[in-house]
C-alpha cells in the first residue's frame, strides 16, 4: 500500500516526517468521570509526560476553574522542553485567561475551538455558519496577538459538512493558526472515512500544507487509534490522545498505542516519533495509580497480559524464538516487573525498582516507610507479592499532604457478629476540632461509614465502593477504592490498602472527602460549596 506521509524533496529523496505527539491526559483525560486530579498529582503526571518525551502537553482548561488555572500555570513554568498548551473556547475571556496561564512556558500554545457540525451550531450555539467562521477568525486573531503558537479546532469536525469544514479551516489558517486540529469529538467516524476527510482537506485547502494538521479522535466506536493512524497515512502530522486511552465517555486515542504502532510498523508508516518508549509502562501506571482508573488486563501495550504467554504452545514458541509470538519487546516499553521476587529480606533497591516501574518516584523517607511496612507484613507470615508492594507504595507516595487533610481519622472501634447489629464509633479531627460519632450498618464497613458521615453535614454522595484483595489468601491486603460525587456531578476518587478491610475503607472514604474539600477550598474557597453550614 502506498504510504502517503512520505514526501520527496527537490532531489527526489524520501523525507521521513516527524509526528508530533500531543498528550491531553491532563485536559481531556482528566474530564473523564472519576479521573479528577489535584494540582500536585497533575504536576507528577506532567513531569512523567516530559520524561516520556511527548511534544505537547495540554495541561488543562484554565477558564474552567481556579484549580485548572493554577495547574496549567505551574506546569507551564516547570516544563523544560515540552510545549505547554491550554484550552480556550473561542471567546476573549477564555483566551486571555488561557494566555495568563500558559505564558510562563518556554514554549506556550493556545488551543481555541468552536463547534462546526450542524447539530452543534444550530442546537448548542444557535449561530449561523457565517457567524461561526467570524467567531473562529476573531478568536484565532486574538490568540495570535498573544502567542505565536495557536491551535484551532472545529469541534465535532467528524460530523461537520466537509466543504464547510474546509472553509472554516481556510479561514483559521488565514487568521494565523499554526496547527489545525480535526477532532472526531463523538467518535463517530470509520477509519477510511476519517482518513479521506484529511485527504480531502489537503486537496481543497492547499495552505493546509503550511501548517500542522492534527487529529483528535474519541473512542465511542472503538476506532480512536485506527482513525488517528488512518489520518497519518493521509498526511496528518500531529496526533492527540491520552495515556491509557482515558477521556470523556469511551475515552480518547491511547497515546501508547499510537506511538507503538508508528514505531513497530515504521516499515509501513515511515514516520518518526520522538517519544522515549521505555517510559511508557511507568507513565501508564502512574496515570492509573493517580486516577484510580485501572488498566484492563488485556489492553494493548500496557495491559498486564500484553506480554504474558500462558498457553503452552506459545511458551514453547517464545522460548525457541521470541519473534514467534512477540512483535514488540516488553523492555521497549519499560516493562520490567515480572522477574523481581520479593521476599522477607528484600531491600530498598528491589522495592524501589518495582515502584519506579509503577511511575512512583518516592523520596528516601517514603522508601524507608514503605520498606518498613513490607517487612512488618512479611513478619506476619504473609507471602509478599508485587501487588502488595505497589499497594503499600501507592498509599505512602500519594498520602494527602498534611495541609489538605482537613479531616483526620484518630481512632475507631467496630463491633460485629452474626447475632448483633454492626456498630461503629469513630473519633475524627474535623478542621482541627475533635468529634466523636457512631453509626450502625448492614455490615462493619457500612457501620463505620455511617459513623463518619454522621459527623459531616455534606451533600457529597457515595458513588462507588470497590473492594479487591490484592493477592490471594485470607491475609491478603485489602485494596479499597471509593468515588464520591458532589452536587455538580464532579467525582472525587481515593484508594487505600491495608491488611484490615475496615481500616482501608475508612481511610479511602476520608481521603476522598479531603480531595473533595480541597477542590472546594481551592476552587470555591467558601466552604459551603457542598460542605458544612
Ligand atoms: O473532542 C473534542 O472535540 C475536543 C476539542 C476541544 C478539541 O476535545
Ligand atoms: Zn476531546
Image: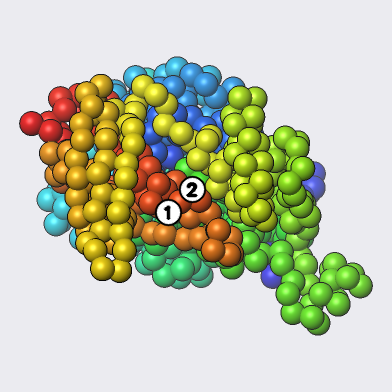
x%, y% of residue 405?
Answer: 34, 28
Residue for point 52% across, 21% down? 78
Q: Residues within 10 Å of mark 2 (few under 14, many from 20)?
A: many
Question: Would you name the residue on which mark 2 appears?
Answer: 498
> Which one is in front, 443 or 491?
443
Residue for point 12% across, 50% down? 126
> Which one is in front, 126 or 385?
385
Spot the residue most to the bottom: 313
> Which one is in front, 450 or 157?
450
Question: Would you name the residue on which mark 1 appears?
Answer: 501
CA gap between label 2 and label 1 equals 6 Å
SS class, disc 1: helix
Spot the residue most to the left: 533
x%, y% of residue 491?
Answer: 29, 47
x%, y% of residue 166?
Answer: 37, 52
Residues marked 2 and 1 touching at CB (< 8 Å): yes
Amino acid at each position: 500500500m502506498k504510504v502517503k506521509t512520505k514526501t520527496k524533496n527537490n532531489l527526489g529523496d524520501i523525507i521521513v516526517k516527524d509526528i508530533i505527539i500531543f498528550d491531553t491526559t491532563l485536559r481531556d483525560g482528566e474530564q473523564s468521570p472519576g479521573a479528577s486530579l489535584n494540582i500536585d498529582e497533575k504536576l507528577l503526571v506532567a513531569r512523567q509526560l516530559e520524561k516520556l518525551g511527548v511534544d505537547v502537553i495540554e495541561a488543562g482548561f484554565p477558564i474552567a476553574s481556579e484549580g485548572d488555572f493554577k495547574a496549567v500555570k505551574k506546569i507551564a513554568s516547570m516544563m523544560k522542553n515540552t510545549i505547554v498548551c491550554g484550552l480556550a473556547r473561542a471567546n476573549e475571556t477564555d483566551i486571555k485567561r488561557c494566555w495568563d496561564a500558559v505564558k510562563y512556558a518556554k514554549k506556550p500554545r493556545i488551543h481555541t475551538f468552536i463547534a462546526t457540525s450542524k447539530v452543534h451550531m444550530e442546537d448548542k450555539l444557535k449561530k449561523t455558519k457565517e457567524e461561526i467562521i467570524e467567531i473562529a477568525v476573531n478568536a484565532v486573531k486574538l490568540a495570535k496577538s498573544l502567542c505565536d503558537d495557536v491551535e484551532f479546532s472545529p469541534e465535532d469536525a467528524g460530523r461537520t459538512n466537509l466543504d464547510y469544514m474546509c472553509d472554516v479551516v481556510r479561514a483559521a489558517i488565514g487568521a494565523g493558526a499554526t496547527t489545525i486540529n480535526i477532532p472526531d469529538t463523538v467518535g463517530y467516524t470509520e477509519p477510511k472515512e476519517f482518513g479521506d476527510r484529511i485527504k480531502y482537506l489537503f486537496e481543497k485547502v492547499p495552505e493546509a500544507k503550511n501548517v500542522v494538521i492534527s487529529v483528535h479522535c474519541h473512542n465511542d466506536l472503538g476506532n480512536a487509534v485506527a482513525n488517528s493512524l488512518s489520518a497519518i497515512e493521509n498526511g496528518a502530522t500531529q496526533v492527540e490522545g491520552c495515556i491509557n486511552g482515558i477521556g470523556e465517555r469511551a475515552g480518547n486515542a491511547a497515546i501508547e498505542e499510537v506511538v507503538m504502532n508508528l514505531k513497530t510498523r515504521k516499515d509501513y508508516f515511515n514516520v518518526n516519533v520522538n517519544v522515549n518508549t521505555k517510559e511508557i509502562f511507568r507513565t501508564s501506571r502512574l496515570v492509573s495509580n493517580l486516577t484510580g482508573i485501572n488498566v484492563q488486563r488485556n489492553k494493548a501495550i500496557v495491559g498486564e497480559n500484553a506480554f504474558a504467554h500462558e498457553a503452552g504452545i506459545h511458551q514453547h514458541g517464545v522460548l525457541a524464538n521470541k519473534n514467534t509470538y512477540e512483535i514488540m519487546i516488553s523492555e521497549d516499553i519499560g516493562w520490567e516487573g515480572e522477574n523481581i521476587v520479593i521476599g522477607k529480606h528484600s531491600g530498598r533497591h528491589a522495592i524501589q525498582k518495582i515502584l519506579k516501574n509503577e511511575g512512583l518516584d518516592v523520596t528516601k523517607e517514603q522508601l524507608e516507610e514503605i520498606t518498613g511496612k513490607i517487612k512488618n507484613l512479611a513478619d506476619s507470615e504473609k507471602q509478599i507479592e508485587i501487588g502488595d508492594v505497589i499497594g503499600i507504595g501507592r498509599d505512602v507516595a500519594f498520602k494527602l499532604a498534611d495541609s489538605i487533610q482537613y479531616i483526620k481519622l484518630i481512632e475507631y472501634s467496630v463491633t460485629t457478629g452474626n447475632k448483633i447489629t454492626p456498630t461503629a464509633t469513630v473519633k475524627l479531627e474535623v478542621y482541627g476540632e475533635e468529634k466523636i460519632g457512631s453509626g450502625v450498618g448492614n455490615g462493619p464497613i457500612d457501620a463505620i461509614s455511617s459513623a463518619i458521615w454522621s459527623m459531616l453535614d455534606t451533600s457529597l454522595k457515595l458513588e462507588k465502593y470497590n473492594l479487591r484483595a490484592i493477592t490471594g489468601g485470607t491475609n491478603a491486603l485489602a485494596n479499597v477504592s471509593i468515588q464520591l460525587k458532589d452536587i455538580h456531578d464532579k467525582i472525587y476518587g481515593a484508594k487505600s490498602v491495608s491488611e484490615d478491610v475496615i481500616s482501608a475503607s475508612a481511610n479511602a472514604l476520608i481521603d476522598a472527602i479531603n480531595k473533595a474539600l480541597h477542590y472546594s477550598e481551592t476552587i470555591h474557597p467558601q466552604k459551603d460549596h457542598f460542605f458544612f453550614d
